[in-house]
C-alpha cells in the first residue's frame, strides 16, 4: 500500500473547488532551491494547486516546506516515511491530485515554471506534452551522449522519433496517468516509462522546447547505475506493448549465426553438414520468433475492445 501523508504540515483547509491544473513537485534535499521554485510556480497566472512530495529529506528541506505550506493555502504537502524514489513521489502526487490535468516539475530549478502556461495550452489538444531540452540547455557532454543513446533506442522501440526521452517536465491528462501508474517505476525512469507507455498505447504526444539551466549542486542521478536501469525499462516497456520489437532482432541474429556457421562448415568440410552449433542457432531462432509472435498476440489482446 502506498504511503500517505496528505497535508501533514498544511493547516489551511483544502478548497473544494476543482483546480484547472495540479502541479506535482517531487522533492529530496533541495533546501537551497525549493522555495524559489515554488514561488515561481505560484506566480503563474493559472488556477493551480501545488502538490509537494518530500521524499524524506534529511537536509532541512522538510522544515522549510512545512513553514511554506502553512503560509500558502494552494500548496499541499506530502511526506514519505522513508526515501522511496523520485518516481514514487510523482505517483503519490498523481494519486492525490484533484485537477484533470497534471504537471510535473522538478524542485531543483532545471524546469522553468514560467513555461507552465505553454504546457497547459498544448495539453488541450494532446494527451501528453513532454519537455524537449533545446541545444541552449546546459548539460555535460557525457549526459548529452547518454540522452542520445536513450532517444535513439527508444525511438526504435516506439517506432517513431523521440527527441527527449528523459526530460521530467511534462503535462498529462489525469485519467491517462492513472491508467499506466502501475507501470511507472519508483526511481528516476518515470519520464521514459510514461513516454513509451503513451506512445505504444496509441495516445497523442507533443514535444515542447524548453531551455533547461545548469543544475546548481550535485545531481542525484547516477549515470551508470541509473542509465542501465533506463535501458532495461525501455526493453520492459517494449516487451509489454510491442514484444516483436525485441524478440525479432534477437531471433534474426540467431538465424544469421546459424547460417554463417553452416556456410563455414560446408566450406571447411566440403560437404553439406549442420554442426551442433548451427542446429542450436536454428532452433533458437524458431523458438524466440514463436515466443515473440505469441507475446505480440497477448499484448494486442490487452487493447481488445478499447475505446
Image: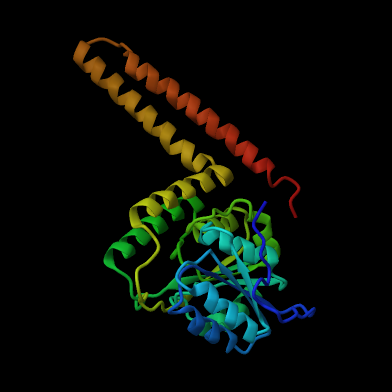
Total labels: the figure holds 0
User: How far from the left and from the top, in percent, is residue 81?
Assistant: 58, 59
Q: Position of residue 12 (x, y in %)?
A: 72, 82
Q: Residue at x 65, y 55 (%)?
A: 2
* Near-viewer residue (257 or 95): 95
In this rendering, does residue 105 appear at all? no
**Which residue is at the front of the view, 301 or 180?**
180
Residue drawn at x 39%, y 61% is: 221
User: Where is the C terminus found, in terms of image quarters?
Assistant: bottom right
Above or below for 136 versus 173: below
Q: Which color scheme is applied?
A: rainbow
68 relative position to 266: left or right = right
Q: Residue furthest left?
A: 268
Q: Identify the image quadrant of residue 9.
A: bottom right
Q: Measured from the top left, where is residue 176 in percent x and y?
A: 67, 61
Quarter assignment of residue 118 = bottom right
Of 7 and 124, the residue lying toward us:
7
Q: Is residue 31 left or right of residue 264?
A: right
Pick whichever, 37 or 294, lies toward us: 37
Question: Which x, y percent locates residue 47?
Answer: 68, 84
Q: Residue at x 19, y 15 (%)?
A: 268
In the depicted structure, whether residue 13 falls above or below residue 127: below
State whether residue 265 is above or below residue 192. above
Would you say residue 203 is visible in this rendering?
yes
Tell me what residue is drawn at x 68 percent, y 63 percent. 95
Q: Vertical placement of 42 versus 125: above or below? A: below
Amino acid at each position: 500500500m502506498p504511503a500517505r501523508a496528505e497535508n501533514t504540515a498544511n493547516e489551511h483547509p483544502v478548497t473544494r473547488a476543482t483546480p484547472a491544473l495540479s502541479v506535482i513537485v517531487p522533492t529530496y534535499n533541495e533546501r537551497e532551491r525549493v522555495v524559489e521554485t515554488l514561488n515561481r510556480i505560484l506566480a503563474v497566472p493559472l488556477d493551480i494547486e501545488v502538490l509537494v512530495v518530500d521524499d524524506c529529506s534529511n537536509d532541512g528541506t522538510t522544515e522549510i516546506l512545512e513553514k511554506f505550506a502553512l503560509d500558502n493555502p494552494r500548496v499541499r504537502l506530502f511526506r514519505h516515511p522513508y526515501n522511496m524514489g523520485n518516481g514514487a513521489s510523482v505517483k503519490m502526487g498523481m494519486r492525490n491530485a484533484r485537477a484533470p490535468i497534471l504537471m510535473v516539475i522538478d524542485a531543483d530549478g532545471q524546469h522553468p515554471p514560467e513555461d507552465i502556461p505553454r504546457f497547459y495550452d498544448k495539453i488541450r489538444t494532446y494527451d501528453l506534452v513532454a519537455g524537449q531540452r533545446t541545444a541552449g540547455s546546459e548539460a555535460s557532454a557525457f549526459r548529452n551522449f547518454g540522452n542520445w543513446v536513450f532517444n535513439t533506442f527508444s525511438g526504435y522501440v516506439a517506432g517513431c522519433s523521440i527527441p527527449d526521452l528523459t526530460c521530467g517536465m511534462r503535462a498529462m491528462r489525469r485519467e491517462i496517468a492513472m491508467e499506466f501508474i502501475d507501470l511507472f517505476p519508483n526511481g528516476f525512469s518515470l519520464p521514459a516509462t510514461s513516454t513509451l507507455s503513451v506512445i505504444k498505447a496509441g495516445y497523442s504526444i507533443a514535444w515542447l522546447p524548453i531551455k533547461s539551466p545548469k543544475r546548481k549542486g550535485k545531481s542525484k542521478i547516477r549515470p551508470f547505475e541509473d542509465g542501465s536501469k533506463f535501458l532495461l525499462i525501455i526493453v520492459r516497456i517494449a516487451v509489454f506493448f510491442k514484444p516483436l520489437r525485441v524478440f525479432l532482432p534477437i531471433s534474426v541474429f540467431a538465424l544469421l549465426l546459424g547460417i554463417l556457421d553452416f556456410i563455414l562448415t560446408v566450406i571447411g568440410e566440403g560437404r553439406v553438414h549442420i554442426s551442433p552449433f548451427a542446429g542450436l542457432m536454428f532452433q533458437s531462432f524458431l523458438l524466440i520468433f514463436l515466443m515473440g509472435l505469441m507475446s505480440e498476440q497477448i499484448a494486442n489482446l490487452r487493447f481488445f475492445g478499447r475505446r
